[in-house]
Image (cartoon, rainbow, N blue to C red):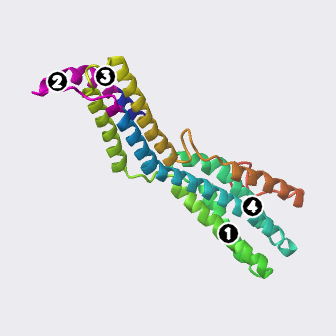
Amino acid sequence: MIWAIVGALLAIPLGAFVLRPRVRTWFGGDFQGLKIESFVGPIVTLTVFLAAFVMAQATQSFQRANQDASVEGSAVSLLFENAAMLPDGAGKDLQATSVCYARAVHHIEWPAMTDGETAPEVDHWDAQFNTLVPKVLSGPGSLVGQVVSLNRSQSEARTLRLYEASPHLPVLTVALMIISIIGVLLLLMSFAHHDMKRKVLLGFGIVLALLLGGTLFLVEQLEEPFRGVVKVQPSVIAKVERDTGALFAAQYPGATLPCDTVGRPVA
């Protein structure tokens, strides 16, 4: 989107210095140009329109991604806690898998999402959940129900998180917005009142270009919530990783996890 801002800024001198002096010759009457209110009107109208119509969708996408990441972390944490209450140590493997899953999401899949990729290591631990959960179905009914429900929540939250990692705003909509912004700037710079000094005209044009270009830039950032300047941080899953790792070490002294420090499976 940086190139869109550059294009908008280039439209200002093109309209002010190339088209503006020639506009008056295109009209037979006494053409006076645009008044100052003609600059204020589009700034207010376009800003409100873009903020209300486009940023609403981008903000919702960002919020959903943040919520899905929080739901996933909470589900893994609660799955670890419920597995700890299963009798005869039946939940030990589930707890170990929970720790490894959190590590892999935090250290491997989160960075991979910036390129739209997933982590095979997380797929591995997700499959381990599907293997281990049926093995505890003979346990207490209430605990088993919680474990099954939390496993489902974790899996669904991960699927939604990966879905929200990609932008969903139609390309045609973005292209139309860019063309509209450049077109409006060209018209304003070309048809501005000739009594308006160029430095005033350029000042208004730069403010409008930065405002609309910045809006598009922010939309792009919010549409890709796991990359860029504005992004969802792995704070929840990082806390789950720390807490579950410490609890596992305290509950099973001397026991080793089936993964390394970043969640890669080990023999």
For this rendering, which residue is in front, 81 or 258?
81
Q: Which mark is residue 24?
A: 2
The C terminus: image quadrant: bottom right
Q: Which mark is residue 13?
A: 3
Q: Is residue 263 visible?
A: no
Above or below, 182 relative to 161: above
Work out how far the residue at label 3 is from the one at label 1, CA to CA, in angstroms.
Answer: 59 Å
Work out how far the residue at label 2 is from the one at label 1, CA to CA, in angstroms.
Answer: 71 Å
Work out how far the residue at label 2 is from the one at label 4, CA to CA, in angstroms.
Answer: 70 Å
Residue 191 in the magenta stretch? The answer is no
Q: Decide which of tag 1 and tag 4 comes sooner along the chain.
A: 4
Q: Decide which of tag 4 and tag 3 comes sooner along the chain.
A: 3
Work out how far the residue at label 2 is from the one at label 3, CA to CA, in angstroms.
Answer: 17 Å
Residue 14 in the magenta stretch? The answer is yes
Question: Is there CB contact under 8 Å for labels 1 and 4?
Answer: no
Residue that carries the numbered disc 1 in the rendered image: 151
> Quadrant location of residue 25?
top left
How many other residues sit within 10 Å of disc 2, few (<14), some (14-19) or many (≥20)? some
Residue type beneath disc 2: Arg
